[in-house]
Amino acid sequence: MNGLLPLNTNPNTVNLWHNAQPKTLANTDIDTIMHKKDTDTLPRRHIESCEDLQTIRNHIDALDEQIIPLLCERIQYITQAAQFKDSAADTRRFGRIEAIVTRAKAYAKVLGADEDYIESVYRHLIDESIRQEKAKWLSLHPDKK
């Protein structure tokens, strides 16, 4: 798997967002993502051609069962970050936000996905994450409200 960490027990997926290892998307520059030669390491799934609405809904529900635990894990790391911030204002770093969005869009492009869709989802995800991180920071520093 070219040094990428497994995301879960499914060997067909890899964790490209985990930043603990040097060979991850989080530590990869955009040019490398955009010109990635070995795209076989990217988690791509065959999308079934469904014959009815219920089958489509079943697939969506199955995806949600994977996405929701990852979002819960993500927000736990984000709220942990509050303890390392000097002020509530530090929970919103525009340079970091733009780096995350740019990286997400580049990843979407490599996968052939709609970059605008991914940007929209990530901007909402980031806004909500900042809201929760700021609330955590304020709970840690009640004297600075």
Image (tube, rainbow, N blue to C red):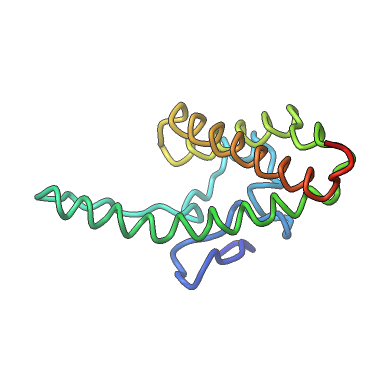
Query: Whole-percent x and y of residue 16?
Result: 59, 53
Residue farthest bottom in this picture: 9
Asked whether 80 or 108 is in front, the reply is 80
Depicted 82 relative to depicted 18: above or below: above
Asked whether 66 or 103 is in front, the reply is 66
Q: Please give the count of numbered marks on the rendered protein.
A: 0
Residue at 73 percent of width and 27 percent of height: 94
Asked whether 92 or 110 is in front, the reply is 92
Asked whether 59 or 34 is in front, the reply is 59
Query: Whole-percent x and y of residue 132?
Result: 66, 44
Question: In which image quadrant can residue 95 be found?
Answer: top right
Q: Is residue 91 left or right of residue 55?
A: right
Q: Is residue 129 left or right of residue 52?
A: right
Query: Whole-percent x and y of residue 39?
Result: 49, 49
Residue at 48 percent of width and 35 percent of height: 121
Depicted 48 relative to depicted 99: above or below: below
Residue at 89 percent of width and 42 percent of height: 143
